[in-house]
């Protein structure tokens, strides 16, 4: 037989352990959900890339040229190299915490939306 005084600390320890295990289960479930979402996104991106590739192969030269002109801002030709400058800047590897995500969006008056907030 176990006395109540001996049993209460065991119950408390078990409750703490159960809470920790429930937290681990929630984290594992969240991670699993994120991985499933990433797999779905990657699959859709692969499908999209395949569609774009097959679509580009079917375009004539004028349509391809129009797409290139839409994407490319300018081409810099030097003696030893060629540099293509795109209209959309590549993402920086380290996010700048000083800039808002709305920095490039403009409102009706032409001002940046990040300036209004």
Image (cartoon, rainbow, N blue to C red):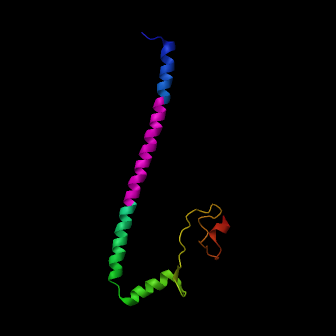
Q: Nearer the viewer, residue 24 or 105?
A: 24
Q: Is 12 positioned to the left or the right of 57 in the image? A: right
- In percent of width and height, residue 99 lies at 63, 64
Residue drawn 36% across the image and 67% down it: 46
The span shown in magenta is 17-40
Q: Position of residue 65 (x, y in %)?
A: 43, 87
Tell me where residue 53 appears, x and y as whole percent. 35, 76
Taking 26 as reference, is 89 above or below it?
Answer: below
Against 89, residue 82 (above or below) is below
Residue 33 is covered by the magenta coloring? yes
Was residue 111 drawn as part of the magenta stretch in this picture?
A: no
In the image, taking residue 21 as reference, residue 109 lies left or right, namely right
Q: Main secondary structure of the magenta part?
A: helix
In the rendered image, residue 90, in percent from the top left (x then y), is placed at 53, 71
Quadrant of res 60: bottom left
Q: Would you place residue 70 above or below residue 38 in this image?
A: below
Q: Quadrant of residue 96?
A: bottom right
Residue positioned most to the front: 80
* Residue depicted at 53% across the width and 75% down the height: 88
Give the total of numbered labels.
0
Where's the C terminus, which quadrant? Answer: bottom right
């Amino acid at each position: 037989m176990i006395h109540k005084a001996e049993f209460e600390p065991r119950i408390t320890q078990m409750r703490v352990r159960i809470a920790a295990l429930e937290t681990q289960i929630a984290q594992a479930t969240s991670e699993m959900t994120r991985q499933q979402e990433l797999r779905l996104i990657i699959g859709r991106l692969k499908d999209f890339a395949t569609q774009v590739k097959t679509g580009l192969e079917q375009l004539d030269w004028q349509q391809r040229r129009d797409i290139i002109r839409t994407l490319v801002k300018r081409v810099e030709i030097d003696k030893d190299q060629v540099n293509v400058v795109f209209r959309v800047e590549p993402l920086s590897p380290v996010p700048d915490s000083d800039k808002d995500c709305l920095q490039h969006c403009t409102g009706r008056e032409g001002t940046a939306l990040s300036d209004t907030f």
